[in-house]
Image (cartoon, rainbow, N blue to C red):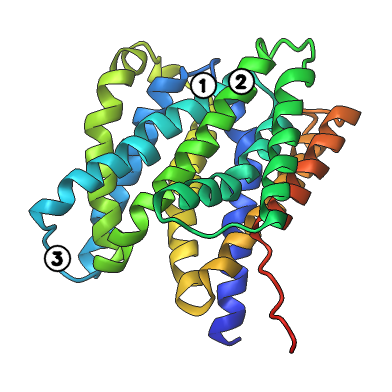
Amino acid sequence: MNKNTLAILAAIGATTVYGINHTIAKGIMPYYIEPSGFVALRVIGAAILFWCISLLGPKEKIRKKDYSRILLCALLGMGINMLAFFKGLALTTPINSAVIITITPIFVLILSIFLVKEKVSSRKVIGITIGLAGALGLILFGQEIRQDAPNISLGNFYILLNAMLYGAYLIMAKGLITKYHPFTFMKWLFTIGILICLPLGYQELLVVKWSDLPFEAVWRIAFVIFGTTFCTYLFNIFALTQLKASTVSAFIYVQPLIGIAYAVAMGKDTITTIKVVAACLVLLGVYLASKKALPKVN
């Protein structure tokens, strides 16, 4: 099996883990641990794993001028971003979160227009509008009465905020990733993330009855730390060594399909007309916003 095929399998693996994570992580909150405590635990666990694997990478020092940018990346990509995702997931349904999260490329495009002055075509404007309409449709009209989803509208808003913040993180992190080895960047990103997330989740970690956690909760927590956080970064890093960034990012469009299929198969969510229409609008919008224009033929 050649490296290109392995890279494709790695990208599929990453998006598969992300897709099923919506249901797996949902099963932990708030029954065993609250969102802020879960975020702190996730960041601490991933930081330890990245420090261990960094021993296999080059020894690099972070330049002083780059620490402020890493701090901003940690705020956007680790602190506020993860907290918004878990807060939202605790309030909404796995299918809603899986659909809304795919709007991230649209926010990347919007931020690129304002921050790096990227040119935008009418097709991209239409795509942005359609995608946002789909996400807002879920937030405004996707309400259901469910015991495990106490405030779906607010939860959907948090997931949308998460997508926006993660888009900003990708823009800010782009320059740093080209400067430093991925292991170096990630270990410091998660280390600074601990300083941000631990104060917010410390009290929630203290009230967790660790000795009474059932196996179901333990394996779900381990999956989020090792699978969703650590492995997905490694899979995407390897994929980027063989494939274009645009190709790797395109795999995010498969995430809601996997997320919906897994949630329904596990009996954790149901498909409704609003969800189907919203998903179609989001996917169509992201496709139009990210599709490259065909070269003109003279």
Q: Which numbered disc, 3 or 2, marks the residue that appears first in the sequence?
A: 3
Q: Identify the residue under disc 2.
A: 155
Residue contact at pointers 3 and 1, CB within 8 angstroms: no
The x and y percentages for residue 96 are: 71, 31
Reading the image, the residue beneath label 3 is 60
Residue 215 seen in render: no
| Element class at badge 2 | helix
Q: Is residue 168 above or below residue 142?
A: below
Q: Nearer the viewer, residue 229 or 217?
A: 229
* Badge 3 or badge 1: first in the primary sequence: 3
Is 194 above or below relative to 46? above
Residue type indicated by callout 2: Gly
Q: Residues within 10 Å of mark 1 (few under 14, many from 20)?
A: many
Residue 249 quadrant: bottom right
The residue positioned 47% from the left and 46% from the top of the image is 111
**How far apart in space, not on screen, are marks 3 and 1 (Cα)?**
35 Å
Q: Is 288 above or below relative to 44?
A: below
Residue occupied by mark 1: 87
Residue contact at pointers 2 and 1, CB within 8 angstroms: yes
CA gap, disc 2 and disc 1: 7 Å
Q: Viewed as shown, does residue 254 lie left or right of 233? A: right
Q: Is residue 279 visible?
A: yes
The earlier-in-sequence mark between 2 and 1 is 1
Residue 163, given in percent of the width and then of the height, sits at: 54, 38
Does 125 sit left or right of 248 as displayed? right
Mark 3 closeness class: few <14, some 14–19, many ≥20 residues within 10 Å: few
